[in-house]
Image (spheres, coloured by chain):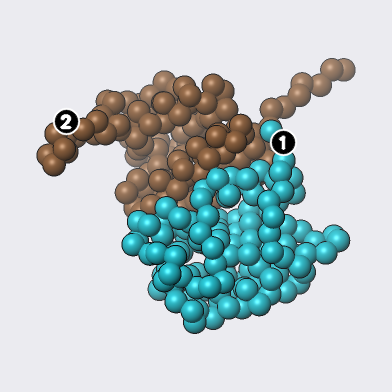
Amino acid sequence: MEAQTAAAGTRAGAGAASYFLLESKGNWAGPTAGAFLMDAVALAEAGHRVRVFLVEDGVLSAVGTDVPEIRRLAAAGAEILVDDFSAAQRALSATTLSPHVRLAGMDVAAAALTEDGCRGVWH
Amino acid sequence: MARMERRMWDLLLILTAAPHSGDVVTSALRLSQAVLDRGGSVRVWACGYANMMTQDTFGDTKLPNTRDPEGHYPSPSAVVQRMIADGEGRFGWIACTACSEERGAVHHVPQVRHRSPLRLASTVAGARQTLYLGGA
């Protein structure tokens, strides 16, 4: 299969790694959900290319405009994607989501995870 | 001496969640299908109660839905069988023998491969990308 590189808003420079991090836990599920997103912030601030894919209950972290982890991720240059199916299952519309995120399908995750050198983590 | 070329899979999903414990099985199947749709290859390693999904006792359909008695709802084992058939060698499903035996869930549909957990590391080594889904 040919590797393809998806466009992404990142600040990654030469030598930086590429991470595709999938968060499936809701922000009430305990401290680990927020900790995982803050790990993503740390990677982005360290200069790595970071894409975060919120899926299942993880999409609830993207609701509203004042989720600290989402603001930090956006400020660090990470791309934040929200699974369209999971959002629809929870009756979330694009208007209820943070302006820092965009809806994406599972095809985007599939493309990223099959890129050469992309490091995927599911939480 | 000639060396045998090892097949590499694009994605390995280690599915540790029980069916119906959440959305995770749906996510695993959606992600698998998305990779297959791109021409890639996917393997699922069923760990723990995920081994219940491919029991041959399910038959092809779920119990009737009384709100849609004419509807056809495939069983999880039928879904896996169809994906294996449609994938034409690009989709594989592995049952962990230890997890299956611990749960008395040893009657998998014939398309499922049986592997000892001792082969987990080599299975991971045979994939370009591995994700653990469902927690410990």
Could you confirm whether marks 2 and 1 are on the same chain? no
Task: Answer above or below: position of A90 versus B25.
Answer: below
Task: Answer above or below: position of B26 versus B33.
Answer: below
CA–CA distance in space, label 2 to label 1: 42 Å
Rendering quarter of residue B79: top left
Q: Amino acid at mark 2?
A: Glu
Q: Which residue is label 1 attached to?
A: A2
Q: Amino acid at mark 1?
A: Glu
> Considering the numbered disc 1 on the image, is that residue within a helix, a strand or a loop?
loop
Q: Is residue A104 left or right of residue A89?
A: right
Q: Which residue is label 2 attached to?
A: B70
Host chain of mark 2: B
Residue A120 in the image, given as x and y percentages of width and height: 63, 53
Specify the quadrant that holds the N terminus of chain B.
top right
Q: Residues within 10 Å of mark 2 (few under 14, many from 20)?
A: few
Does residue B123 appear in this view?
no
Give the drawing colour for chain B: brown
